[in-house]
Image (cartoon, rainbow, N blue to C red):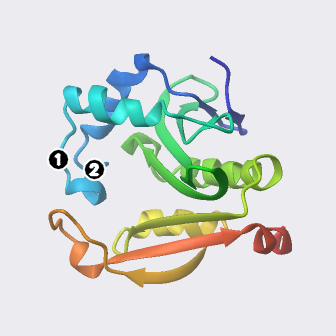
């Protein structure tokens, strides 16, 4: 299956069922899952029955919402990016997200992929607004959002099914509109 998007160092491609082992390794790292569920690994059954079907979902306008990220020079699986429409009827507002292997942290991959997706969304996919959120204490993810051009919108308290370390500080939302993106290019 071909790539969806390429940058200088990344290839973003559609997921396949063959990605299950890479996803199990990704979601099995307590540090990767720290701000998702407190660091609990995701087991194979959950990856195969819940995670992978979500990543394989095709939207009616011909795109997926999640993309496997590979290092362009080696083909190494780095994780994934989310660029998922929030409404079923079109891609006007999308949620940006990312989950990368610890070995990929601090190397600029998250910012590079996020910027490329934002550019593609505003130039090719009809996106009008990109939104992203994370725990307020997740400074690494917040920094990626800011470096990708998103701006702080609000601090809020989400409804966590179970509290994890840091959730008492709430969450933050960042966003970028097409108009603002065009002004800052």
Residue with the mark numbered 1 = 40
17 vs 109, left or right, is left
Residue drawn at the location 68% of the way across and 32% of the way down? 4
167 vs 100, left or right, is left
Q: Residue 168's spot in the image, x, y percent?
A: 21, 78
Observer-nearest of 16 and 77 = 16
Are there few (<14), some (14-19), or many (20+) residues within 10 Å of tag 1? some
Q: Earlier in the sequence, mark 1 or mark 2?
A: 2
In this rendering, the count of numbered labels is: 2
Q: Are marks 1 and 2 in contact (CB under 8 Å)?
A: yes
Q: Residue 5's spot in the image, x, y percent?
A: 70, 35
- Quadrant position of residue 122: bottom right
110 vs 50, left or right, is right
Q: In which quadrant of the rendered image does the C terminus lie? A: bottom right
Residue 165 to residue 21: above or below: below
Secondary element under disc 1, as helix, strand or loop, is loop
Between marks 1 and 2, how big is the CA–CA gap?
6 Å
Observer-nearest of 118 and 86 = 86
Residue drawn at the location 46% of the way across and 43% of the way down? 104
- Quadrant position of residue 180: bottom right
What numbered label is drawn on residue 123? none
- Quadrant position of residue 1: top right
Secondary element under disc 2, as helix, strand or loop, is loop
Residue with the mark numbered 2 = 33
Q: Residue 157's spot in the image, x, y percent?
A: 31, 79
Are there few (<14), some (14-19), or many (20+) residues within 10 Å of tag 2? some
Please, which residue is most extreme toward the front here? 89
Residue 182 to residue 122: above or below: below
């Amino acid at each position: 299956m071909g790539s969806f998007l390429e940058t200088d160092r990344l290839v973003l491609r559609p997921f396949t069922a063959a990605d299950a082992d890479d996803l199990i390794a990704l979601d099995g790292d307590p540090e990767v899952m720290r701000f998702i569920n407190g660091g609990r690994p995701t087991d194979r059954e959950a990856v195969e029955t819940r995670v992978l079907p979500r990543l394989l979902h095709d939207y009616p306008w011909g795109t997926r919402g999640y993309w496997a990220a590979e290092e362009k020079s080696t083909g190494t699986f780095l994780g994934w990016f989310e660029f998922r429409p929030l409404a079923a009827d079109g891609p006007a507002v999308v949620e940006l997200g990312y989950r990368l292997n610890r070995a990929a942290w601090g190397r600029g991959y998250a910012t590079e992929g996020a910027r490329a997706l934002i550019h593609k969304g505003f130039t090719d996919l009809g996106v009008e607004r990109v939104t992203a959120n994370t725990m307020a204490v997740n400074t690494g993810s917040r920094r990626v959002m800011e470096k990708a051009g998103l701006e702080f919108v609000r601090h809020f308290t989400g409804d966590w099914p179970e509290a994890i370390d840091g959730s008492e500080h709430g969450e933050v939302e960042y966003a970028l509109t097409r108009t603002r993106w065009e002004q800052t290019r």
